[in-house]
Image: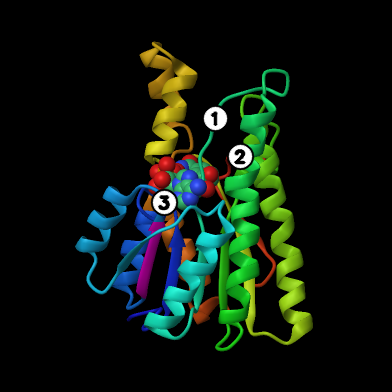
Amino acid sequence: MKRVNNKVVLITGGASGLGAADARLLAAHGARVIITDINHQQGEALAAEIPGSLYLAHDVADEAHWISVLAEVKKRFGQLDVLVNNAGFVNFSTVEEQSLEQFRLHLQVMTEGTFLGCKHAIPLMRETGGSIINISSVAAVKGIAEVFAYTAAKGAIASMGRSIAIHCQNQGYRIRCNTILPGAHDTPMTVKALTELAGADTEALTQLHDVGQGKPEDVANLVLFLASDESRQINGAQLVIDNGETIK
Ligand SMILES: NC(=O)c1ccc[n+]([C@@H]2O[C@H](COP(=O)([O-])OP(=O)(O)OC[C@H]3O[C@@H](n4cnc5c(N)ncnc54)[C@H](O)[C@@H]3O)[C@@H](O)[C@H]2O)c1
């Protein structure tokens, strides 16, 4: 059964990791997928692999990019059914070490990127209704000293999702907005982060790598559900996917 047949889906940061898994799974379920990223080589290679998909160059922190990407989506497809605000990165710094420049960059890419995506996609999505899926992190609800700016950016994403859901409902738009809070999943970002944390300690790295580690496909299954009409009653939710790590 194709669960998102013919839906037009835009996935930011779709060239790698979780976004790439979303693109593959949703396309396999009949979606017309637009992958956007700043990693053009990888994005184009992935789009070439997924029949009917399209790659567009897109820095989510740049409002002008959002406007031109969405204009292109409207021109080519006439509608947008699903937006996955997924692009992100992480750097290590505690509050004391954190430079203002790096702090702002985290907020620009993740918080502002998600805000701009919702702001500019809603006018297109409200024509047909749809589903916005924002990718936060368990860092939004846990104290993680080493990734201070990341926790700030991801916390804001989780909060914004509720306001967006209620706004759309108040306006009578048939647009849902939900937030996913993943724990550690095996992607290039996590591998790089864990390697930095563990340093040369390969035993520590193996241990870190094994703890609660999911596969990108696990998050993609949740994205597929939220993108599909099966989740039509789920709106303004924050869904943790971490195999119980957060509740321990
Ligand atoms: N992997 C995990 O364990 C995990 C856990 C919680 C949350 N997340 C979140 O999931 C999302 C995807 O992470 P991932 O693990 O797949 O990482 P990844 O590094 O594999 O993929 C992230 C993608 O985002 C792109 N990107 C970065 N800055 C961008 C920008 N300004 N504009 C457009 N694209 C940009 C990168 O080029 C990359 O392709 C991120 O928001 C991340 O914070 C991941």
Q: Are marks 3 and 2 in contact (CB under 8 Å)?
A: no
Kindly indicate whether the residue at mark 3 contacts the one at mark 1 (C-beta within 8 angstroms). Answer: no
Q: Position of residue 88 (x, y in %)?
A: 51, 45
Considering only order in the chain, which callout, 3 or 1, is on the residue closer to the N terminus?
3
Image coords of residue 245 (percent x, y): 58, 39
Say left or right for 188 vs 193: left
Residue in the picture at 47% in, 32% down: 211
**Mark 3 lies on residue:** 18
Q: Which residues are magenta?
A: 32-36
Q: Who is closer to the viewer here, 33 or 162?
A: 33
Is 210 placed above or below 109 here? above
How dense is the environment of label 3, judged by Cα within 10 Å: few (below 14), some, or many (20 and up)?
many
Q: Secondary structure at mark 1?
A: loop
Q: In which quarter of the view is residue 26 placed?
A: bottom left
Identify residue for label 2. Answer: 106
Q: CB of mark 1 within 8 Å of CB of mark 2?
A: yes
Amino acid under label 3?
Leu
Q: Nearer the viewer, residue 206 or 227?
A: 227
Q: Which residue is mark 1?
A: 91
Up-down relation of residue 243 to residue 92 (above or below):
below
Label 3 beta carbon within 8 A of ligand 1: yes
Q: Position of residue 6 (x, y in %)?
A: 37, 84
- Residue 37, given in percent of the width and then of the height, sits at 41, 53
Q: Would residue 204 be found to the left or right of residue 125 on screen?
A: left
For marks 3 and 2, give the CA distance. Answer: 18 Å
Q: Secondary structure at mark 3?
A: helix
Q: Residue at x 71, y 78 (%)?
A: 168
Taking the view exactly as shown, the residue that stands out farthest to the right is 170
Mark 1 crowdedness (10 Å alpha carbons): few <14, some 14-19, many ≥20: some
The mark found on residue 246 in the picture is none
